[in-house]
Amino acid sequence: MSKMKAKTKAMRQTYLAHFDECPLSAKFYEDAQAAEVTSHAMARGILFHDFAEIIQGERAGLSDAEIDTIIDELLTSRSDLVLPMRDHDDLRDLCRRWYARFEPAGAGSKTEVKLEVQLAGQRITGRLDLLTIEDAWARVRDYKTNRGLPTAEWVRGSFQVRCYAYMVFVNYPAVTTVEVENEYVRYGAKRSATIERDQFENLEVTLIDIIEKVGEARKSDDWIAVPGTHCNRCANTAGCPISAELRGEGAITDELDATTAASDLVAIEARRKDIIAGLKSWVDENGPVDGGQTRYDYSYSEGERLDKKPKIALKERLGEADIDPAEYWKPTQTTRFIPRKLTEEELEGGDDA
């Protein structure tokens, strides 16, 4: 009989991140992983990461046609993934945008780095897209294919950022500072957080607490369901005991829900414009009107704004005076959730648009 001790089954940091938001979603995630269930969004993300790994490894100076060839090869070879044809162009666009900004990793960088730590009797694993080590400083870069850009505050507080920093500290004892940078490849925008080694103990205590709660949930088979925006990423919304009406921002969980909600919103916005126009006319003639705890009235203000053309001229004048315009104009990167009219081609093409 072998005396070798059986290796403890590892917990992925992704699993723990799910548990941190909603324990039941972590169970659903694990079940989906065991059944090898992958959503279209996950497939797109995996294929992009495969593309990035190929590029980081050996490719530079590629044409759009060569990029398309790599993507076509990935779509053919990854028979374990399903990405609808309507999403192929989106994947190509993601890859081209990222490649246009691509800079080869330096000598101190490694791609697709697998890290592991032992904590509270568990093996925790994580996979870093790009890890750069320079003396006592490390940077973890994680590629995101999301359409929305989160705030810097949200990124700094995310479980993944804290977990990655902890894993780097454990595996690289000489590192005292870890910068975790999320790159949103659709826009080239970056959100980052810097964590110092003096936060190590707090990180460890937090992770141990979550790991112990996972152990309790597995032992009792009692998985708490928590509503929120993460509901639309849940692997099994049908199995959730929380009804859609009580999920708040996470109420939309499939394409039919989304399409229905979008159609409802068009009608609501049209009605809203009519109501606002009517209220403005009434208030103009009769004065303010109260609706519940809200008062509608005209509010007068005075101010100044800088038109676009003078703004450009002012920047040039500052440069002529050896004053850096960047001291006064700070670049911003954000996304806005806005509707737009479909083109005739999109209306005629349906899902193929």
Image: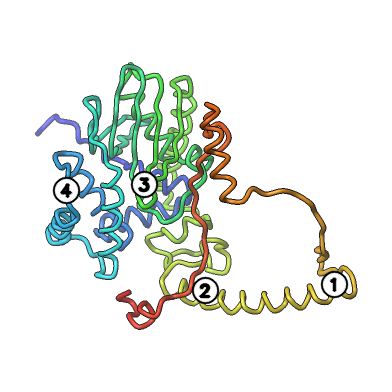
Q: Which residue position holds label 3?
A: 15
Can residue 28 be spotted in the picture? Answer: yes
Distance in Å between CA atoms under marks 1 and 2: 34 Å
Q: Secondary structure at mark 1?
A: helix
Q: Which residue position holds label 1?
A: 284
Residue shown at 30% from the left, 76% from the top: 352
Residue shown at 50% from the left, 41% from the top: 331
127 sits left or right of 243 in the view = left
Distance in Å between CA atoms under marks 4 and 1: 62 Å
**Relative to residue 19, is residue 271 depicted above or below?**
below
**Relative to residue 313, is residue 74 depicted above or below?**
below
Q: Which residue position holds label 2?
A: 261
Distance in Å between CA atoms under marks 4 and 2: 42 Å
Inspect the image, locate mark 3, and give the three-letter code of the amino acid beneath it.
Tyr
Q: Position of residue 61 (x, y in %)?
A: 17, 44
**Which quadrant holds residue 143?**
top left
